[in-house]
Amino acid sequence: MAKFKIFRVLDQDIPEKYRERYFALIQQFDEEKYGHIPPSLEYYRIMYALPKEDGKEFKITLLVNEDDFVIGFGMQGWNTKYDQLQSGWMDLYVTPSYRRRGLGNRILKDLVQRFPEEVTTLRAYPREYTPGYFFFQQFKAKPNSESFLVEADLREFNLEDIRKLANEHKENANLNGYIIIFTKNKEFGDNFPLDEFVSLTEEIANAIPRGEISFEKRTHSTERYLMRIERHMKAGYDVISFIATDIKTNQPVGFTTVVINKYYPWQAQQKHTGVTPEHRGMKLGLTLKYQTLLYLLENTEVRFWITNSNKINEHMTRINEILKHKVTGTECGFEFKKDELSKALERI
Ligand SMILES: CC(C)(COP(=O)(O)OP(=O)(O)OC[C@H]1O[C@@H](n2cnc3c(N)ncnc32)[C@H](O)[C@@H]1OP(=O)(O)O)[C@@H](O)C(=O)NCCC(=O)NCCS
């Protein structure tokens, strides 16, 4: 083992000689985990140079071999200001030819030790039945949550059919007393009820089924929302939302958001979709997703529309099925008590 060096770096100061190789390894990690063509290297360079999001801490560990070549990494993050201050997340990667030599455990030990005292719950999200899944099974037989990874191939849709269906759903929503608003990045149009919309995103984020992963209420504010959009834009994303508002009150009651990045324009990542309980059962969720689909077909070069949705979230699963999403795998959430994981690692 002595021939491997493991060292700790902050996100903004990785020595230059290691940087490009580190970016290539994250790209490799993404490709292995998601099975998609990953973003171009430029995306990882830009993400690295972006200042941290307000209230978030992020650290990197590099694993280097005897030839001073990066062969693996660990990443970890936690919140310092808002939301779940007691929990942290981690990712780790060892390039395939160096696996099963105990290096994953060495990186994990380093990550666990370096979380601050106040972070007591740690999470990792490998894909089911991959090396990362078996790696975390050393410590825990079963994951605490499971989400379907799903995707639709946009070549399977006929533009004319979708135009018709999207318009029919929109007209129906109008007849039921709703209008559908389109927003892109910070372009909200006149009289857009931004504060109310941000409150709705908070309500939905807190209501999403998450299985047995521990959860603390999230806090969204307009200031934070706008900062997040700005950061997304700097990273090359367009943030597209369709929002249903109640005509009588001008209150947003449902929304769906998708992001597309110029460094991997063949992919759209579907983010949260939600409708407040009083307005459910009117097909607003499906209507909003049809508007998204039409937008993707008419305005982008996206081929894969991807998302994940917790296995227990039946309504979202149903909508995704109607929109020809196919399950490509399962993402497993493993949650650990830090002190227990630390003790288990001491025994290895
Ligand atoms: C997860 C990963 C970092 C593990 O790296 P590694 O250096 O091979 O891990 P280790 O050698 O320290 O493995 C420690 C133990 O984990 C278990 N394990 C690891 N990989 C395994 C596999 N493919 N099958 C079964 N058990 C496995 C074994 O119990 C192993 O001990 P053993 O070799 O004595 O049997 C590596 O497989 C990887 O980079 N995978 C892709 C990225 C990923 O999924 N990361 C986790 C998501 S957060």
Image (tube, grey):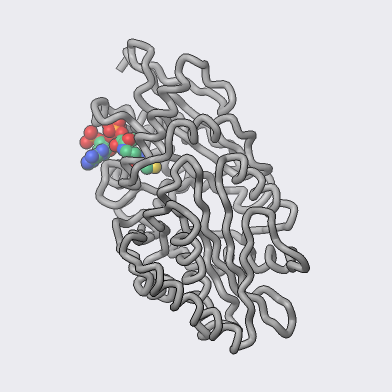
Q: Quadrant of the C terminus?
A: top left
The vertical placement of 69 against 180, above or below, is: above
Q: Report the number of discs.
A: 0
x 31%, y 41%: residue: 32
- Residue 127 location (% of width, % of height): 33, 50
Instruction: Point out the residue furthest to the top here.
Output: 67
x 38%, y 12%: residue: 68
The front one of 117 and 51 is 51
- Residue 210 location (% of width, % of height): 47, 63
The front one of 201 and 341 is 201
Q: Is residue 214 visible?
A: no
- Residue 317 location (% of width, % of height): 38, 71
The image quadrant that residue 119 belongs to is top right
The vertical placement of 155 against 341, above or below, is: below
Instruction: Point out the residue furthest to the right here.
Output: 191
The front one of 264 and 255 is 264
Q: Quadrant of the N terminus?
A: top left
